[in-house]
């Protein structure tokens, strides 16, 4: 608090305000102070509650994504099959028609994650023996590029392609664990998750300078998804790395994964910016992501990786992993064997990108995320002893203050996307290691303009904004499960009085949303209480009204609820089937998906004719393609609560039923 500066006592100094106060006044001041402190503590508590809401909901959806694993595996096969088919048809085209040169070059970069090398020797030759690098990037070009991005322009597709093309070749020359040396530059800066928030990257550049030979950077993964500018961030970072390959270190995060990108926004970002060229770019991005190094060690002392450690993390094994085979780390995390059929290698790679530090000793499976593990202080200790490492810097978790210490200040989490969950929800941070200083120098910022020193003044207002966003998120969850709630409430209130004790209400909320939130503390946001302190549970269901944001016309409420519950999943499946990322599903793509699904569930073969007629039925406007609206209109997602089958989602189209 601003108490002013106190100058040294001296003759003739004016007595301070406190000294001239009467006892009554002093009493009043201390009362106000106590009241103020209590209010601050209350606000802090409210802020913590919101935080839990955001993180719980975030991890909940990641888990759901992982739960679709078996389905991914088969759709992965489907993707490969379609790829083959497409390449064959391209070859056929070659005989007479014009073929897009770029398309062939980049698509051949990307093959399946089944082989140990994603590139054919033929393509490799073509890439490495090029007479002149096509980009010839300069810092001046990069500055123009940044200016253009700030003005909201989309980066030219030719420039984008040439940066990606060059960057891919460069990534492949790096080892899995890169070594950074800051002894000559006397500094190196580590940046954490950016998640498509260009404004944060630019703020860091403004405060800390552009990357250069004298100003090296480690960018520690998760620069795409969620935010709107993953493309720009990638191209700016890859561009600077092409100019300063030995001063820009980019490590892979769990979102540098094409399957994650289908669900969390990067794919749709690229599609909306590049339209027909999007699929080529996306393939190039997927290829580069799988070629990114997994970690970086600064001055042999500080290990930087996105997730962290696991049981017996072995740097030698991690160095030897065939990283490029891991086109999707998410898929590897679930099948456990990984693309190379080596369970131990797979475990090491997955932990490096997915794990979180925890307080308990040893390691446990990361239940909240559904992938990686939670490792304890003893694991950190043993690892540091073995490798003579002094500190681990990792990212992967949003932090209220942009950074956080764990394990006796041996593990530092750095998260650089400010206002990640809602405006004012958190600060961003980056960390600089100046070789002279023993301690890392941590800089916090909020790219939305609320700087740290202003925070306390507006804490109340800020908590209000964050709380509103958190409550909205929960109401969405409540809406998704409205009917489950009605059933659960009628069970605990058989007489139908509409009133239940707070504790009962809280446990129903936890059970149905699967979110372990401080419901009692937050109850005022959702329900009204009567004079006896009983919860009127209907008030939380009646207040829910939502816009699904997809422009889908929803008629009856029950259907809209089930549709809304699975909209994310449905969109994800749609993107998987739409292999050429055209924004709509062709009949070929649809038939292939039906085939794969049928093989997966082991039901009898559906003929091509049958699947074609299904496609025709779904194609409501008869233009020969199925767009997302047609897809959701025709497919009713029904959650079957069969007593024996447990939770199953079945997609019913016409008379055909497919269980996912
Ligand atoms: Mn992450």
Image (cartoon, grey):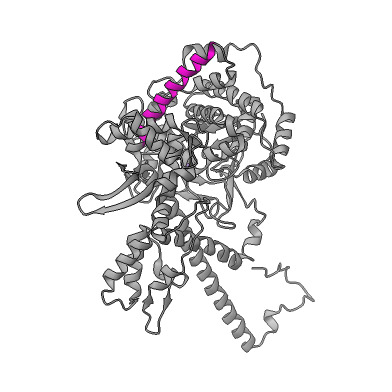
Q: Quadrant of residue 17?
A: bottom right
| Residue at (49% x, 66% y) in the render | 46
Depth check: give the residue in front, 201 or 110.
110
Q: Is residue 450 above or below residue 10?
A: above
Q: State whether residue 143 appears in this view.
A: yes
Q: State whether residue 188 appears in this view.
A: no
Q: Is residue 146 above or below residue 321?
A: below
Query: In what quadrant of the picture does the N terminus appear?
Result: bottom right
Q: Is residue 344 above or below residue 642?
A: above
Residue 505 in the figure: left or right of residue 213: left
Magenta highlight range: 72-95
Depth check: give the residue in front, 165 or 572.
572
Query: In what quadrant of the picture does the C terminus appear?
Result: top left
Depth check: give the residue in front, 173 or 27.
173
Name of the residue lying farthest toward the right:
12
Give percent across and percent down for residue 217: 60, 35
Give percent across and percent down for residue 504: 31, 71
Q: Is residue 9 above or below residue 389?
A: below
Q: Quadrant of residue 466?
A: bottom right
Name of the residue lying farthest toward the left:
644
The number of numbered discs placed on residues in the rendered structure image is 0
Instruction: Determine the main secondary structure of the stretch shown in magenta.
Output: helix
| Residue at (38% x, 27% y) in the render | 317
| Residue 409 sits inside the magenta stretch | no
Give percent across and percent down for residue 506: 35, 68
Give percent across and percent down for residue 75: 37, 33
């Amino acid at each position: 608090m601003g108490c002013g500066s106190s100058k040294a006592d001296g003759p003739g100094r004016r007595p301070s305000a406190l000294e001239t106060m009467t006892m009554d006044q002093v009493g009043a001041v201390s009362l106000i102070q106590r009241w103020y402190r209590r209010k601050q503590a209350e606000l802090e508590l409210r802020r913590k509650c919101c935080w839990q809401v955001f993180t719980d909901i975030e991890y909940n959806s990641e888990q759901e994504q992982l739960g679709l694993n078996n389905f991914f595996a088969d759709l992965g096969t489907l993707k490969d099959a379609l790829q083959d088919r497409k390449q064959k048809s391209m070859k056929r085209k070659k005989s007479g028609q014009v073929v897009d040169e770029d398309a062939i070059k980049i698509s051949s970069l990307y093959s399946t994650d089944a082989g140990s090398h994603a590139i054919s020797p033929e393509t490799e030759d073509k890439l490495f023996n090029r007479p002149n690098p096509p980009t010839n990037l300069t810092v001046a070009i990069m500055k123009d590029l940044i200016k253009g991005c700030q003005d909201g322009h989309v980066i030219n597709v030719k420039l984008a392609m040439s940066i990606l093309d060059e960057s891919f070749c460069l990534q492949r020359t790096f080892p899995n664990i890169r070594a950074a040396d800051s002894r000559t530059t006397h500094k190196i800066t580590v940046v954490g998750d950016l998640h498509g928030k260009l404004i944060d990257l630019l703020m860091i550049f403004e405060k800390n300078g552009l990357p250069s030979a004298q100003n090296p950077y480690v960018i520690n993964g998760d620069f795409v998804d969620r935010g709107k500018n993953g493309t720009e961030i990638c191209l700016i970072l890859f561009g600077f790395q092409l100019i300063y390959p030995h001063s820009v270190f980019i490590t892979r995060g769990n979102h540098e994964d094409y399957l994650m990108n289908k669900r969390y926004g990067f794919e749709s970002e690229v599609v909306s910016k590049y339209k027909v060229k999007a699929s080529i770019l996306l393939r190039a991005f997927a290829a580069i992501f799988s070629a990114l190094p997994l970690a970086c060690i600064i001055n042999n002392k500080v290990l930087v990786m996105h997730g962290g450690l696991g049981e017996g993390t072995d740097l030698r094994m991690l160095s030897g992993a065939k990283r490029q085979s891991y086109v999707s780390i998410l898929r590897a995390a679930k099948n456990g064997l990984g693309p190379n059929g080596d369970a131990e290698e797979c475990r090491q790679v997955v932990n490096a990108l997915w794990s979180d530090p925890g307080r308990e000793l040893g390691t446990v499976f990361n239940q909240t995320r559904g992938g990686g593990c939670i490792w304890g202080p003893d694991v950190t200790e043993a690892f540091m002893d073995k490798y003579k490492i002094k500190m681990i810097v990792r990212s992967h978790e949003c932090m209220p203050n942009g950074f956080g210490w764990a394990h006796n200040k041996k593990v530092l989490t750095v998260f650089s996307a400010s206002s990640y969950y809602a405006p004012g929800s958190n600060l961003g941070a980056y960390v600089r290691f100046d070789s002279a200083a023993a301690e890392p120098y941590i800089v916090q910022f909020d790219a939305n303009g609320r700087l740290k020193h202003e925070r306390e003044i507006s804490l109340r207002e800020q908590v209000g904004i964050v709380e509103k966003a958190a409550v909205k998120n929960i109401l969405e969850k409540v809406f998704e499960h409205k009917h489950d709630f009605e059933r659960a409430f009628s069970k605990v209130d058989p007489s139908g009085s509409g009133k239940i004790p707070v504790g009962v209400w809280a446990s129903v909320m936890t059970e149905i949303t699967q979110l372990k939130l401080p419901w009692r503390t937050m109850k005022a946001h959702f329900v009204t209480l009567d004079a006896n302190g009983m919860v009127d549970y209907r008030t939380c269901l009646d207040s829910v009204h939502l816009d699904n944001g997809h422009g889908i016309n929803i008629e009856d409420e029950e259907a809209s609820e089930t549709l809304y519950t699975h909209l994310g999943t449905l969109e994800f499946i749609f993107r998987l089937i739409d292999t050429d990322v055209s924004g709509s599903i062709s009949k070929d793509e649809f038939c292939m998906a039906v085939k794969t699904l049928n093989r997966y569930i082991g039901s009898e073969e559906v003929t091509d004719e049958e699947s074609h007629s299904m496609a025709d039925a779904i194609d409501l406007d008869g233009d020969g393609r199925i767009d997302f609206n047609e897809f959701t209109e025709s497919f009713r997602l029904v959650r079957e609560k069969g007593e024996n089958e447990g939770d199953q989602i079945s997609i019913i189209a016409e008379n055909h039923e497919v269980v996912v």
